[in-house]
Amino acid sequence: MLWLLLPQLVLWLAGGLAAYQLAERYTNAAVDASLLQASRALARQLRPLDNGLLIDFPRAAQDVLEADPDDRLHYMVSTPPGAFILGNHQLPLPPAAVMARPPIGQPYFYDALLPPANDEVGARQPLRVAALFLRQGGRDDPNAVLLVQVARSRTSREELARGILWDTLLPLAGLILLMTTVIWLGIRAGLAPLLRLRREVEGRAPTDLTPIRLDAAPGEVRALVMAVNGLLAAVQHNLAQQKRFISDAAHQMRTPLAGLKSQAEVALALAGDEAQRERLRRVHESADRSAHLVNQLLTLARAEPDTAAARGSPVDVRTLAQELTATLVPRALREGIDLGFAPVEEEGSPVGEIATNASDAAGAGAGDGNAHKAMDSAAITTPAEAPPLVVIGHAWLLREALSNLIDNALRYAGRGAVVTVDVQRDGDEAVLSVTDDGPGIAPEDSSRVFERFVRATDQGNGCGLGLPIVKEIVERQGGRVTLAPVQPRGLCARIHLPLAPAT
């Protein structure tokens, strides 16, 4: 549109300049014709005599010539080289070259400046002057020349030229505006298929590699769309192969690692030498850490773009968090950690939480002497009126994200710590939080820990993939993850997810 409008603007300006020059040319011709007619009329009033010059120029004729004060007609009659006879003696003479070789009987037109009168103060007045040289033909000097000059102000000529210019430019400007509108409508109509194609591509998720519909592409770019579709298919094939390779490799590694852990546990139970038992414990820890890394890599592979790109389904994150917390209670008991689900208050009615500390569990299982077994059967009590918090997403991915946050809290909070899982509504978001009273994370590491294989502590056997997996999953569900310190000590990890629209 810009490349079409700029030439129009240049042409409009060029047309205005040409129109002004043309108008000036024709106004000059009209003014020159009127000056020539006036000079010849004045020349007819001059009659040479044998010994002089008869001037038949009554006062009434002079008043007619000088009647308009805004456009006065100046005149002067003289005999070169400057003998004044009649008129305005301040009227400038023609150039010296013309005076030297006067064109007898032919008019000569030129521009000049009329100085102010003796009793006036002001700028010089621009004039258009017609000079007519005539033979005087007297008896005393038959070759004597008579100069008749008639001049008019250029102001009227310039006003006429400007009037012609505006009368030309305004319709031309209207025509250009009309042409611009027509061009704009034509461009919109011509590029509408490209606009639809652009919207189809812009509206896609970054992970959507499905082919572009050819019916959305205009014929001129259909070959380009086919080439892009071929590229998308090749990229999709390569991604699928890469994911399959990672998944297969991780699955293949899980079996020997599980065998290694089992053999290490058996050898540890049978070993009698303390040094040998220490080495076997290190082998078991390394195998356990490798198995954890493989599991995290598998989770990361499952959360890759093409899986997360599929549209999710409604998920009640409150129920999901309660169930997940219940499944992790036995592990928390084994590690001496108090894991609980925060009570939900609806209209002032508190909801009971899972009894997760070791003493409560021991009391519940006193009948059979097995506290862990008692906790395995712990029930979550939720009031019927507690409203669900529903989001649109993938339940297994959200479960994996929350599981990683709880796993981090259990790994790094330390024995005797308290870990609380909470789900609340904050405006149009559901907020899942995992709070612990462990050592926490240094403020300068709060953003770095979301990078892959970055750990904020040397404690534990983590691999630096837990929080990156959480961030990857949550962002693909349209949410965000935040970390905040807890006073006097501890860390609160929050998952913010947009609530599903009410139906």
Image: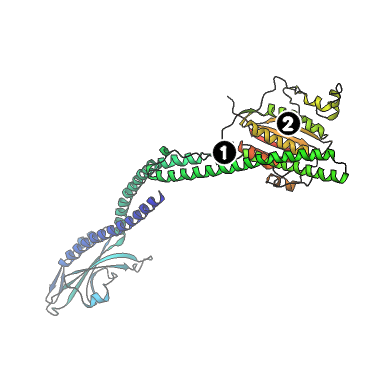
Residue 202 in the image: state x and y as whole percent: 50, 41
- Foreground: disc 1 or disc 2: 1
- Residue at 34% x, 55% y is 11
Query: Which residue position is annotated with label 2?
Result: 422
Of the 4 image quadrants, the one containing the C terminus is top right
Say which element carries label 2. strand
Camera sees residue 485: no
Nearer to us in this view, 383 or 403: 403
How many marks overall? Answer: 2
Q: CA distance from mark 1 to mark 2?
A: 30 Å
Mark 2 nearby-residue class (10 Å; few <14, some 14–19, many ≥20): many
Indicate the amino acid at tag 2.
Asp
On the image, which quarter does residue 437 sit in? top right
Residue 498 in the image: state x and y as whole percent: 62, 33
Q: Residue furthest bottom?
A: 140
Image position of 476 (left or right of 128): right
Residue 320 in the image: state x and y as whole percent: 68, 28
- Residue at 31% x, 60% y is 155
Indicate the amino acid at tag 1.
Asp
Query: Which residue position is annotated with label 1?
Result: 306
- Residue at 30% x, 51% y is 167
Residue 330, compared with residue 442, is above or below; it is above
Camera sees residue 118: yes
On the image, which quarter does residue 122 sit in? bottom left
Mark 1 nearby-residue class (10 Å; few <14, some 14–19, many ≥20): some
Say which element carries label 1. helix
Residue 388, compared with residue 401, is above or below; it is above
Residue 44 in the image: state x and y as whole percent: 15, 66
